[in-house]
Image (tube, rainbow, N blue to C red):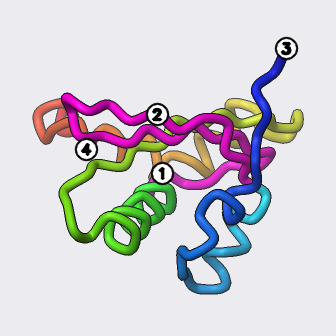
């Protein structure tokens, strides 16, 4: 039995983002939202049929935090799942998604990033 999902902007209807950013997340479906109280973190699991760069998901995490949780400190973390066509082979991913890989490594720490 699969978890029911909802379109991104039906879950976050009050979120205001630029049009190009809105279209990027229009086909995203939210699968689950979990609050980790000890870590003060809201984990948002989503599914999409096209890649969204890690830089753009980070920007959306920031938009949610700033617009919807500005009165208190809450970390927002996406857990992405992608259902991609065959065009997304390893070569394509390395050519088009390398910046996201590097961005994610840099977020883990400068030591890992510079190795």
Q: Residues within 10 Å of mark 3 (few under 14, many from 20)?
A: few
* 18, 96: nearer the viewer: 18
Mark closer to the chain start, 1 or 4: 1
Left or right of residue 104: residue 81: right
Q: Which mark is residue 25?
A: none
| Closer to the eye: label 3 or 4 | 3
| Magenta residue span | 28-55
- Residue under label 4, please give it: 107
Q: CA distance from mark 3 to mark 2?
A: 19 Å
Residue placed furthest toward the top: 1
Q: Earlier in the sequence, mark 3 or mark 4?
A: 3
Q: Residue at x 67, y 45 (%)?
A: 30
In magenta segment, residue 48: yes
The residue beneath circle 2 is: 34
Structural crowding at the residue carrying mark 1, measured as other residues with C-alpha within 10 Å and reported as few (<14), some (14–19) or many (≥20) = some
Disc 3, disc 2: CB below 8 Å? no
Circle nearer the N terminus (3, 2): 3
Residue position marked by numbered label 3 in the rendering: 1
Residue depicted at 68% across the width and 65% down the height: 9
Q: For residue 80, which quarter of the picture?
A: top right
Tag 1 and tag 2, C-beta contact below 8 Å: no
Q: Is residue 105 above or below residue 28?
A: above
Please name the residue that numbered disc 1 is placed on: 54
Mark 3 falls on what kind of element? Answer: loop
Q: Nearer the viewer, residue 31 or 47?
A: 31
Q: Residue 2 at x, y = what percent?
A: 81, 21
């Amino acid at each position: 039995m699969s978890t029911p999902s909802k379109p991104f902007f039906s879950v976050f209807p009050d979120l205001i983002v630029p049009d190009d950013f809105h279209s990027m997340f229009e086909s995203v479906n939210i699968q689950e939202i979990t609050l980790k109280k000890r870590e003060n973190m809201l984990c948002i699991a989503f599914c999409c049929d096209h890649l969204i760069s890690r830089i753009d998901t980070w920007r959306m995490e920031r938009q949610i935090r700033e617009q919807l949780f500005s009165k208190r400190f809450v970390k927002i973390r996406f857990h992405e799942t992608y259902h991609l066509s065959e065009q997304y082979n390893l070569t394509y991913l390395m050519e088009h998604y390398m910046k996201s890989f590097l961005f994610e490594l840099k977020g883990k720490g400068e030591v890992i990033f510079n190795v």
